[in-house]
Amino acid sequence: MALTQRLEFRQSQSLVMTPQLMQAIKLLQLSNLDLTTFVEEELERNPLLERANDEAPAGETPTDAGQYGDGDEAGGGDGQGDDGFGGPAEAFEPGQEEWMSKDLGTRAEIEQTLDTGLDNVFSEEPAEAAARNAQDAAPTTYTEWGGGASGDEDYNLEAFVAAELTLSDHLAEQLSVAFTGPAQRMIGQYLIDLVDEAGYLPSDLGQAAERLGASQADVEGVLAVLQKFDPPGVCARSLSECLAIQLRELDRYDPAMQALVEHLDLLAKRDIVALRKICGVDDEDIADMIGEIRRLNPKPGMKFGSARLQTMVPDVYVRPGPDGGWHVELNSDTLPRVLVNQTYYSQLSKKIGKDGDKSYFTDALQNATWLVRALDQRARTILKVATEIVRQQDGFFTRGVAHLRPLNLKAVADAIQMHESTVSRVTANKYMATNRGTFELKYFFTASIASADGGEAHSAEAVRHHIKQLIDSEAPAAILSDDTIVERLRGSGIDIARRTVAKYREAMRIPSSVQRRRDKQSALGNVLSTALSDRSRNPEPA
């Protein structure tokens, strides 16, 4: 077969991922904070974009420049105050509004009307007078700070708020007093930089000596001093060391307490019998020792300045409707409002002569138009997905988490005729405010667990809720094991394996049946001992 060259025409369809399409897909999975940041960057980059709710900048008020003739002489030249003379209009007596609203004319006409010179009336510039008044009488209220003839618009209440002291700053202040040698200060500052927000250091400090070029003994010596800093327990490398430091500060670190601190795993398991043997004390002493441990602070660094948690803002609101259904609406406060300035583009297109400039503004117009459409499409998609979730999970909104249905992305995607990946991006980092609390949209997508009688499958979240209810209602004398919980669930029509019950229980941080039995017996013993001691102190009359 001979090889030849020839031309052929073929018609085919293909999806081309343009940069704009990729950005539109990215917008779907952005949270409201990330979306606001993205839009702010586009507003700075694109001159044809503007906010839909833009207002006049603060301090710019409409003024009539020619009303008082020479504004620098009559009004101070800086527009201070509402009356044009450096003070607020409220400073004048009643009945002068009409006089103030008239056209006073030039400086000479004003002096003739007042029968005196303006220098006798306004002997000082408004700014100088305000500065002198501020020195004569220290302001004590907001009105005195912000009012007066100065009309100071730079007043900022945050300037009077003290900066929050962080744990690192607190330790650095003590470091400057504790050490005088530069080598020790360098080691100490390096260790302080490794302290986390809870006040702990990494368990392995071997690399610290290597990086600083110091000996391990020098690092340990500096660390021993740091562990004496305030707050007690800071710069520890483990929970046991943190508690030991605090107990030494209280002069309570005796051999029995040392044995207890070294066996915190037994304390977590509530194995009081083993702890009593290890510490060599009786029941009363071990109870007092455990009480002292509980009064200590396991995270000493948390009382200092830490990262502020930002309030979660929902993207969708779900409210009961008047017809018994549910009303779904978007939170408009989380949606950036931008517009395309077509007027500005029209004016520029008539004046621009260079091809490069025309191409730049043409691209800017296309990008601005695309962004407005992408934001609108994003809002519509979120509303469509949220509405379908509410329709699918109507039982949850009406009767609670026990009636949460199994739901996956494919069911929602098929219902609204979208791709699963689109639904996945929409539900990422989005929250829904409901009558039962605020939940992430992904919360409503749960795995299904088969029914024991062949009926409708159960939601995994509903099964977890059922397990928690069974454990919460168990009696101290009849603790439910995982096998017993499996039997109870199968009696309720839920077919589940024991390992699944154990996995759900551990995910909810519920201890095992052995630990729960110890906890409840210990709590019951404390109640009985308290009741017996009260009765011994207050015996009943014969």
Image: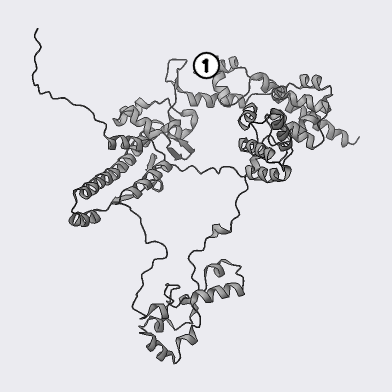
| 470 in relation to 63, above or below | above
Q: Is residue 130 left or right of residue 374?
A: right
Q: Residue furthest top?
A: 1
The residue located at (35%, 55%) in the rendering is 53
| 468 in relation to 369, above or below | above
Spot occupied by residue 83 in the image (x, y as percentages of width and height): 43, 76
Q: Which residue is mark 1?
A: 490
Spot occupied by residue 389 in the image (x, y as percentages of width and height): 38, 33
* Quarter of the figure that contains the C terminus: top right
Residue 316 shows up from this direction: no
Front residue (pair 288, 483): 288
Front residue (pair 60, 325): 60
Question: Mark 1 belongs to which amino acid?
Answer: Arg
* Quarter of the figure that contains the N terminus: top left
Q: Secondary structure at mark 1?
A: helix
Where residue 216 sits, quadrant-wise, is: top right
Spot occupied by residue 316 in the image (x, y as percentages of width and height): 41, 41
Spot occupied by residue 371 in the image (x, y as percentages of width and height): 30, 44
Front residue (pair 108, 84): 108
Q: Is residue 456 left or right of residue 14?
A: right
| 94 in relation to 175, above or below | below
Q: Is residue 492 left or right of residue 228?
A: left
Residue 162 shows up from this direction: yes
The residue located at (44%, 26%) in the rendering is 446
Q: How many marks?
A: 1
Q: Residue furthest right?
A: 542
